[in-house]
Image: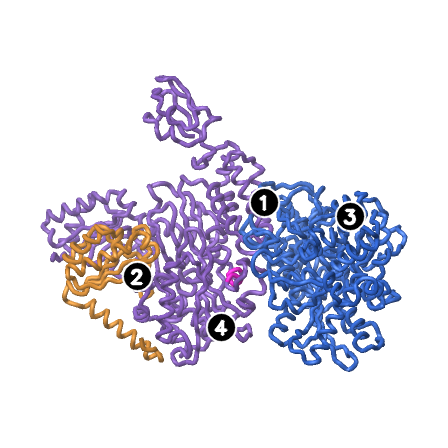
């Protein structure tokens, strides 16, 4: 077995590859051989380190030296200075932008690690089907601590002091919610875990339940202890079979150990959890709709107040929190509120999990401290925009959120900042769009989702969103007028102002935020009948460039509607009235003679 | 399973499991007790993690390599699924991305058996609650 | 009483704690328009889904507008009920609703009585800025009710009536988003569902989405056919409500004008269902006494309590929901059907009219009566005992069509012999009336003594479930009354579990009884109207010279000339019926 003493890790992420990391690897290998270290040092490509803005990156193990902005010409110095003489190459070290100090990253500095995993602490580490592994990582210790050392009031105080806010989207202070439910007097109360994750492209809660189900179980029991409930319910969509399976396994294990059931840890506290399956209606993520669905009624929201904390499931006080919120609880208890509330911004403590998706290199599940900027998330963690294209917009908050421009890239992510920027935190979907995305089309996409998922109970959401959608369709079909943009705004504001639940109150956000930030695109569609991103099919125009056309007749023979005419060896012509914009001519032409505009 | 009746019981289990893990991590026999974790969340499974896991189980057994292959949840690197974490005794764990059969074969031959890193290592770019 | 201070439209007002903004505004004379909201005071019926969003108001400090119908007042609340923002929101929301509503008001059955039309007028809608696709659904026609849900605005009133009040559970919101609509499950037809045709959905529908099957054209055709003798019967509750259609105050009795109008419409004989109500008492009362005396003699095969069977929706309800109890209700047919049966036998023979040349029309406060007269048990050689049942509303339409100045009509009498009735027959129109009429007769037949007092106030009222014990010459007769099928269900559950101690129970499907029937002039959520109709019914009773069914001279004559005695074989054949288990298969 070869036993390399030194490893040189070169980032092989898309961004760094584009910046010649292949050549760097070659050069490093070359110099290692040159100095005869080939049996001591190995050079390997790694996945993206994040921190792409400072790439290409070379990390030297075992001493964890982190070189940034490396060029092929630097290979010689790295080998000769660092490997042979054991001296770092100062010019390649990262300079802290604030202190201007060079950092060599002795382990523990981790300055390039933008993520902090709290809710995801066990995801990808433990076997989710082993309660022992969970226990080995402090599992159920928080519950034990609460049951034996803390009164419910003290526990709630700890949660309140931690500053934890609901991660499902609303951002209501969790401790306060627990306190209100505790104070509601009733013979029976319930703890409900909302696992009805439904934003397009979001899978934070599913991953937590699949990777660390016990953390949610433990937190629900703590919540039950605090509010005075002995019954918990997990409302989870049936489309999450693996999460349901893992949760069931975890529940059985917890029961077998006596960590659920009667007289838990000999403290006299009883707690049981049941699973309720939802049919996957987005609106059932709204807590009153969720409760009605669990009661066997149509999943539609009812007016609040009364809030579930006063009158919820079966009319009893019910505390509803989402999966990620619960997953934070045991850590807060174990490490203390004062540890937790040091992370994040003034009014948004802790971390937030995001499902990073769209036109981004490192699509993935990430968890960052509140206050991390969008730029850090998109470039340092996400590895930047795919295919080297330019960034256009980032959508947060799912169908309730908004599209933010590059002007907001340096906005620290927290509840208040995103709201102020015209979007919202939401449950954690984050979709990145590049310059090829049509923002009118994006607004239409989200509205189509809302349209499908509205329960139809209140008029503005049921009919208003349909009308918004129709106007957007009119615009993307090239039939829009300037007054339509005004109508979109007016109608959006009334829908927000009058809808019954959060779904309708936020459904026009994608429309409003795209009009606010990308009005020029709307105007281009409406006035010039042009889609600047070339995405709106109806607005595309295929033309034949006479000078380039050889009259080969290939387009003529392939056009499915006979819209192309012309003599052999003569320039051809596309009849715009007949053209259905299928793009076949564009694909078939061997002479680049078809122009798309 | 015996019931955990007190906090002391809970602590005992925690210590038992932890000492088992330590024993494995501190082993001086490189080819013994290799630990392989396969990311088996919905995303991983959709990308073929089940086949990958089966391959590791079968192949390591056939080659008589003393290894523990377990499943784990989503590691977060959706762009590089299936993902696999390999811990050789006495070494830091290493995460590999895009682990199909071919890659798995390479991991066994090059990393597990020879201890050489291979291209495609995913650097862990996050802090944990213990950092 | 706890009160709080708030400001509505710049005026400080003191209101009760715990009420809604809508109630607070109304108590200070501020009218906030509502569309989906409906509250029937005293009947414990309220529809408050907060769905239409017409009643939104501005509350200072709130991000969005608040629905007045659902939002509870709070101390110091500052409310603006008609700001520009509010008016714009209301108009826009209404425009949206109208944008998904057929604009066929000119020919809509609900035109002129439509809450949506009124609202469009009230909010001054002159243009719909947001036009687009309209939802279309298959029209669903049943024997009694037509569902034209293109006109549904999702107010959910019908759903609330069907589920909460009647506990029938046929109507509920289905589909999502723009396609959401109130419908039977899987969009099945009403006549395949367990619908009882009580018509309470029709009674509360604010638009033309739910209406009765209009049969006025058939009636007009029959009247113009010289080969037919067309006779009409009119139910007790009609006379207490028809005046409302002609702008008379609710509770105005129009019995005389009603008879006059029917005569002017060209009916050959104008009779009264009240006559048949008296006949019902003879049969049902006798059946009750039979069962009671056998029970008291220790006959274990006798089932008590006996349940009334006048209400066709109630009959269909227990056939679907409690078929195991189908031998408990009285076998007596309803007054409508007794009338038809006697008309096409006794009367036809007497007048020498062939059955097929006699057309019997009934004027009913009810839409289920349309279904009832189509039931196979009530046909002879496919010829129904009652040919057409039209509602109070349809009759009003006919009167207007015939250009009859209703309010100026003289008071006229019903024709004889089937037009004579007693006070007992009249009170069939209200909850508690059938059982009171039965008690008046049964008491005298049982005790062989005249009643000391005819008004049984203990049986009257509007409470959903009532009970009373009547001293039957030393025997305490325990009586139960329920109106609204949800209340009926509660009593039936008690009978099933053996908890019930009642000897006799009266059940009417509609809240208030027939005065609140699905075919009556629309009450638009005003429960006072129902109470006034009820008062009118009791007033008509006390005005009557004869107030006990068994003293109706023409009833006596009918038995002497034709039927023999109550429960005779002939009576059994013509005046009694049987019930079916409808738990499987189609409902009719």
Q: Is residue C312 left or right of residue A371?
A: right
Look at mark 2 in the image and give the residue it sits on: B72
- Mark 3: few/some/many CA within 10 Å (<14, 14-19, 20+): some
C139 shown above or below B59? above
Quote the CA–CA distance across marks 4 and 1.
Answer: 46 Å
Q: Please, which colouring scheme is shown?
A: by chain
The numbered mark 3 sits on a residue in which chain?
C
Looking at the magenta stretch, what is its main secondary structure? Answer: helix
Query: Residue B103: which numbered mark, if any?
Result: none
The chain coloured orange is: B
Could you tell me residue A580's position as x and y percent? 45, 30
Q: Position of residue A217 (x, y in %)?
A: 40, 68
Quadrant of the rendered structure where residue A412 is? bottom left
Q: Which of the chains bears the disc numbered 2? A: B
Report, in whole angstroms, how far the alpha carbon at label 4 lies from the one at label 3.
76 Å
Q: What residue does disc 3 label? A: C357
**For the residues tagged 3 and 2, is the chain the same?**
no
User: As rendered, which of A29 and C167 lies closer to the eye?
Assistant: C167
In magenta stretch: residue C458: no
Q: Are marks 4 and 3 on the same chain?
A: no
Labelled disc at residue C135: 1
Up-down relation of residue A27 to residue B72 (above or below)? above
Report crowding for label 4: few under 14, some 14 to 19, many 20 or more residues within 10 A (C-alpha). many
Quadrant (top left, top right, bottom left, bottom right) of the C terminus of chain C:
bottom right
Based on the displayed image, in which of its 4 quarters is residue C76 positioned?
bottom right
Q: Which residues are magenta?
A: A289-293
Which mark, residue A227? 4
Q: Is residue C203 visible?
A: no
Q: Check the rendered structure and report the hue given to chain A.
A: purple
Q: Residue furthest bottom?
A: C474
Of the residues tagged 1 and 3, which is closer to the observer? 3
Q: Residue at x 61, y 42 (%)?
A: C130
């Amino acid at each position: 077995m070869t036993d390399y003493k030194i490893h040189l890790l070169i980032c092989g992420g898309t961004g760094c590859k584009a910046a010649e990391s292949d050549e760097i690897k070659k050069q490093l290998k070359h110099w290692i051989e040159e100095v005869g270290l080939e049996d001591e040092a190995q050079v390997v490509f790694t996945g993206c380190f994040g921190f792409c803005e400072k790439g290409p990156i070379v990390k030297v193990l075992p001493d964890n030296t982190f070189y940034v902005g490396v060029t092929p010409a630097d290979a010689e110095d790295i080998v000769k200075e660092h490997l042979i003489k054991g001296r770092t190459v100062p010019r390649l070290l990262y300079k802290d932008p604030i202190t201007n100090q060079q950092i060599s990253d002795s382990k523990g500095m981790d300055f390039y690690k933008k993520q902090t995993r709290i809710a995801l602490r066990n995801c990808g580490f433990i076997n989710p089907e082993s309660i022992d592994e969970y226990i080995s990582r402090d599992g159920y210790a928080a519950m034990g601590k609460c049951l034996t050392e803390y009164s419910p009031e003290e526990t709630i105080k700890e949660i309140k002091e931690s500053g934890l806010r609901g991660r499902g989207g609303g951002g209501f202070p969790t401790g306060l919610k627990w306190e209100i439910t505790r104070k509601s007097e009733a013979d029976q109360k319930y703890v409900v875990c909302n696992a009805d994750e439904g934003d397009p492209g979001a899978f934070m809660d599913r991953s937590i339940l699949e990777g660390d189900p016990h953390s949610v179980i433990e937190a629900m029991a703590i919540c039950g202890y605090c509010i005075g409930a002995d019954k918990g319910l997990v409302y989870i969509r049936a489309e999450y079979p693996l999460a349901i399976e893992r949760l069931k396994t975890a529940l059985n294990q917890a029961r077998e150990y006596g960590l659920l059931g009667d007289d838990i840890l000999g403290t006299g506290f009883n707690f049981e959890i049941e699973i309720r399956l939802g049919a996957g209606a987005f609106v059932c993520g709204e807590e009153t709709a969720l409760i009605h669905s669990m009661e066997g009624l149509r999943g539609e929201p009812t007016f609040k107040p009364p809030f579930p904390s006063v009158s919820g499931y079966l009319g009893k006080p019910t505390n509803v929190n989402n999966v990620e919120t619960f997953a934070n609880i045991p850590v807060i208890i174990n490490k203390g509120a004062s540890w937790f509330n040091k992370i994040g911004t003034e009014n948004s403590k802790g971390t937030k999990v995001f499902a990073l998706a769209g036109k981004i290199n490192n699509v993935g599940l990430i968890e960052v401290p509140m206050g991390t900027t969008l730029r850090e998330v998109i470039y340092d963690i996400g590895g930047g925009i795919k295919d080297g294209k330019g960034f256009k917009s980032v959508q947060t908050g799912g169908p309730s959120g908004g599209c933010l421009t590059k002007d907001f890239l340096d906005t620290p992510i927290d509840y208040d900042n995103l709201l102020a920027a015209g979007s919202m935190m939401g449950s954690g979907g984050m979709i990145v769009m590049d310059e090829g995305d049509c923002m009118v089309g994006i607004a239409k996409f989200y509205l189509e989702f809302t349209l499908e998922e509205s329960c139809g109970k209140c008029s503005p959401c049921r009919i208003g969103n349909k009308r918004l959608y129709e106007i957007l369709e009119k615009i993307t079909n090239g039939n829009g007028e300037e007054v339509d943009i005004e109508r979109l705004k007016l109608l959006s504001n009334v829908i927000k102002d009058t809808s019954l639940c959060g779904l309708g109150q936020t459904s026009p956000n994608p429309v409003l935020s795209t009009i606010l930030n990308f009005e020029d695109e709307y105007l281009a569609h409406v006035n010039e009948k042009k889609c600047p991103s070339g995405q709106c099919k109806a607005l595309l125009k295929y033309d034949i460039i006479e000078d380039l056309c050889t009259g080969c007749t290939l387009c003529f023979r392939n056009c499915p509607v006979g819209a192309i005419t012309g003599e052999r060896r003569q320039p051809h012509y596309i009849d715009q009235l007949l053209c259905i914009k299928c793009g076949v001519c564009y694909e078939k032409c061997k002479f680049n003679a078809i122009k798309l505009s | 399973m015996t019931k955990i009746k007190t906090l002391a019981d809970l602590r005992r289990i925690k210590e038992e499991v932890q000492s088992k893990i330590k024993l494995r991590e501190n082993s001086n026999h490189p080819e013994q007790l290799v630990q392989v974790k396969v990311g088996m969340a919905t995303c991983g499974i959709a990308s073929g993690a089940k086949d990958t896991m089966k391959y590791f189980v079968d192949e390591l057994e056939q080659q008589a390599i003393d290894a523990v292959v377990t499943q784990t949840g989503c590691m977060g690197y959706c762009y590089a699924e299936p993902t696999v974490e390999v811990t050789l005794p006495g070494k830091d764990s290493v995460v590999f991305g895009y682990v199909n059969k071919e890659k798995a074969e390479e991991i066994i031959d090059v990393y597990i058996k020879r201890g050489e890193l291979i291209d495609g290592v995913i650097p862990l770019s996050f802090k944990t609650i213990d950092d | 009483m706890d009160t709080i201070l708030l400001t509505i439209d710049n005026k400080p007002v003191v209101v009760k704690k715990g009420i809604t903004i809508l109630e607070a505004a109304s108590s200070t004379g501020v009218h906030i328009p509502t569309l989906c909201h409906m509250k029937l005071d005293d009947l414990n019926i309220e529809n408050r889904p907060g769905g239409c969003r017409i009643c939104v108001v501005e509350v200072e400090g709130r991000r969005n507008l608040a629905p007045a119908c659902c939002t509870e007042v709070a101390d110091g609340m500052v409310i603006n009920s008609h700001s520009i923002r509010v008016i714009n929101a209301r108009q826009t929301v209404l425009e949206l609703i109208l944008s998904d509503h057929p604009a066929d008001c000119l020919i809509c059955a609900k035109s002129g009585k439509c809450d949506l039309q009124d609202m469009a007028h009230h909010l001054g809608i002159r243009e719909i800025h947001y036009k687009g696709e309209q939802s279309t659904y298959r029209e669903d026609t049943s024997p009694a009710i037509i569902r034209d849900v293109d006109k549904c605005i999702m107010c959910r009133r019908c759903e609330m009536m069907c589920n909460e009040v009647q506990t029938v559970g046929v109507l509920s919101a289905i589909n999502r988003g723009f396609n959401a609509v109130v419908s039977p499950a899987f969009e099945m037809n009403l006549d395949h569902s367990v619908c009882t045709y009580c018509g309470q959905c029709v009674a509360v529908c604010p638009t033309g989405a739910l209406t009765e099957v209009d049969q006025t054209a058939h009636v007009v055709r029959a009247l113009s056919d010289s080969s037919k003798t067309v006779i009409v019967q009119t139910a007790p509750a009609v006379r207490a409500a028809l005046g409302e259609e002609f702008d008379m105050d609710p509770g105005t009795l129009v019995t005389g004008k009603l008879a006059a109008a029917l005569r002017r419409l060209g009916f050959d004989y104008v009779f009264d269902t009240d006559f048949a109500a008296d006949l019902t008492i003879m049969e049902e009362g006798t059946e009750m006494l039979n069962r009671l005396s056998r029970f008291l003699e220790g006959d274990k095969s006798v089932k008590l309590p006996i349940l009334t069977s006048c209400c066709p929706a109630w009959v269909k309800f227990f056939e679907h929901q409690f078929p195991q109890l189908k031998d408990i209700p009285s076998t007596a047919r309803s007054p409508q059907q007794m009338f038809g049966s006697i008309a096409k036998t006794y009367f036809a023979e007497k007048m020498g009219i062939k059955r097929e040349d006699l057309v019997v029309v009934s004027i009913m406060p009810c839409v289920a009566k349309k279904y009832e007269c189509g039931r196979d048990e009530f046909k002879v050689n496919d010829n129904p005992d009652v040919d057409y049942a039209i509602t109070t509303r349809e009759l009003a339409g006919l009167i207007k069509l015939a250009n009859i100045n209703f309010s100026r009509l003289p008071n006229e009498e019903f024709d004889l012999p089937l037009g004579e009735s007693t006070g007992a027959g009249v009170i069939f129109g209200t909850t508690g009336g059938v059982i009171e009429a039965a008690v008046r007769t049964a008491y005298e037949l049982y005790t062989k003594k005249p009643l000391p007092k005819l008004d049984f106030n203990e049986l009257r009222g509007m409470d959903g479930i009532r009970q009373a014990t009547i001293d039957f010459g030393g025997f305490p007769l325990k009586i139960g009354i329920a109106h609204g099928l949800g209340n009926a269900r509660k009593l039936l559950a008690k009978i099933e579990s053996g908890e019930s101690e009642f000897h006799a129970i009266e059940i009417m499907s509609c809240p208030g009884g027939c005065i609140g029937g699905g075919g009556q002039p629309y009450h638009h959520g005003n429960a006072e109207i129902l109470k006034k109709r009820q008062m009118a019914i009791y007033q008509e009773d006390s005005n009557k010279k004869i107030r006990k069914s068994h003293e109706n001279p023409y009833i006596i004559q009918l038995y002497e000339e034709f039927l023999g005695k109550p429960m005779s074989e002939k009576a059994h054949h013509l005046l009694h019926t049987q019930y079916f288990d409808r738990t499987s298969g189609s409902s009719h």
